[in-house]
Image: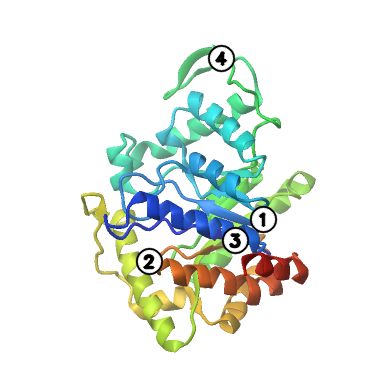
Amino acid sequence: MEFCLQLSAYYPNHDLGGKQLYGNMLDQSVLADKLGYDAVSITEHHLISILLMPAPLQFAVKIASETSNVKILTSVVVLPLHDMRTYAGEVVCADIFTEGRLMLGVGRGAFGFEMDRMGVPLDISREKFDESLDVLQALLLHEEVSWNGKYYQFDSLTVMPRPQQPGGPPMMMGVLIPEAIYHCTKRGFHIQTTPLSGTHAQMLEQVDAFNRGKEECGDKGKDLTLTLSRVAFLAKNQKDKQRKIELAHHYYGQFDNVYTGEGIVKNGMVEAIPRKVSIDKTAENLHICTSDEMIDQLAPYAEAGVDRFILNVNFGVSQTETMDCIQQFAEEVMPVFSKRNAQESVLGRSQVA
């Protein structure tokens, strides 16, 4: 099992500023690259203060310019918000500019507040996503493409420049529902998923759906991968653990607001609403713990067949603590699971020192 770092695109107040926010994320990327993480991941969200990244492909190019090896995942780009005729060209350019390290995770969008104000409400986002995906794949794979659908109608055109490889960079489908994971895997897509703050049993259902779909693909599915994201952070002791759990609980009050709640947002800042689950349940369903506890908690993911675990540190912890966690996780947890050898980890630590 390899490891990916989800960059912490959390904007707690206007005093932070975009320059500092994205500077912090870039520093996290550089450290992850030096320490041997397989990848870093970038969200796409607009108009809101959590998971804030309105320009994921641009930022992927910036990360590539400052790093050497780490893959760059989008987790995920929201296809219904883009015009595929221009977006296909942007993907091709980003793939070139990142020197082939881009992995394009795609999805339909999840936050009603955001999607409504961008003109693609959730009640149509599924069907627009489906058509957008078909158009994007066609434009990346073929020349002289024409289309006559519900959301796209255009005469024959060829996206330029052409992709470096047929079909463009590796594409990953961002899906949560097990049955959808199964069907997307059968169609030949890599999968990105997360149980969010759900239970271990929900995670196992998602993994099982991927494994069933991959098995039914036979030889065509042998290279398909499952990437799974979960909030995870190392704690020094029980007091530190409790403080971070409280931060995560508050953060998920904001997440719930725009994901399942009314979408109360003022001047771009998402308000926290009371959670329907207790703080103890939040703690149970996240991985905020010591290194030894983390190893025990991640073992079932590796045993279940997860190929890449996204370490989601995005819930409001300071940049200093986040950087410390990234390094400690690489030194004490990753070597237990990763194919990368200890020498690479030692090299990463010496470069950081």
What amino acid does circle 1 point to? Arg
Ranked by sequence position, the earlier of labels 3 and 4 is: 3
**What residue would you read off at disc 2?**
316
Mark 2: which secondary structure? loop
View extreme (front): residue: 353
**What residue would you read off at disc 3?**
32
Neighbours of disc 2 within 10 Å: few (<14), some (14-19), many (20+): some
Q: Position of residue 277 (x, y in %)?
A: 33, 73
Q: Nearer the viewer, mark 3 or mark 1?
A: 3
**What residue would you read off at disc 4?**
157
Q: Which mark is residue 64?
A: none
Q: Nearer the viewer, residue 23 or 291?
A: 23
Which residue is pictured at 31% across the width and 34% down the height?
Answer: 119
Query: Decide: marks 4, 2 in contact (CB < 8 A)?
Result: no
View extreme (right): residue: 219
The image quadrant where one finds the C terminus is: bottom right
Q: Is residue 114 above or below residue 149?
A: below
What amino acid does circle 4 point to? Leu
Q: Quadrant of residue 326?
A: bottom right
Query: Decide: marks 3, 4 in contact (CB < 8 A)?
Result: no
Neighbours of disc 1 within 10 Å: few (<14), some (14-19), many (20+): some
Ranked by sequence position, the earlier of labels 2 and 3 is: 3
**Is 287 on the left or on the right of 298, as rendered?**
left
Ranked by sequence position, the earlier of labels 1 and 2 is: 1
What amino acid does circle 2 point to? Gly
Q: Nearer the viewer, mark 4 or mark 1?
A: 4
**What residue would you read off at disc 1?**
212
Mark 1: which secondary structure? helix
Mark 3: which secondary structure? helix
Which residue is pictured at 48% across the width and 43% down the height?
Answer: 56
Q: Position of residue 230 (x, y in %)?
A: 51, 65
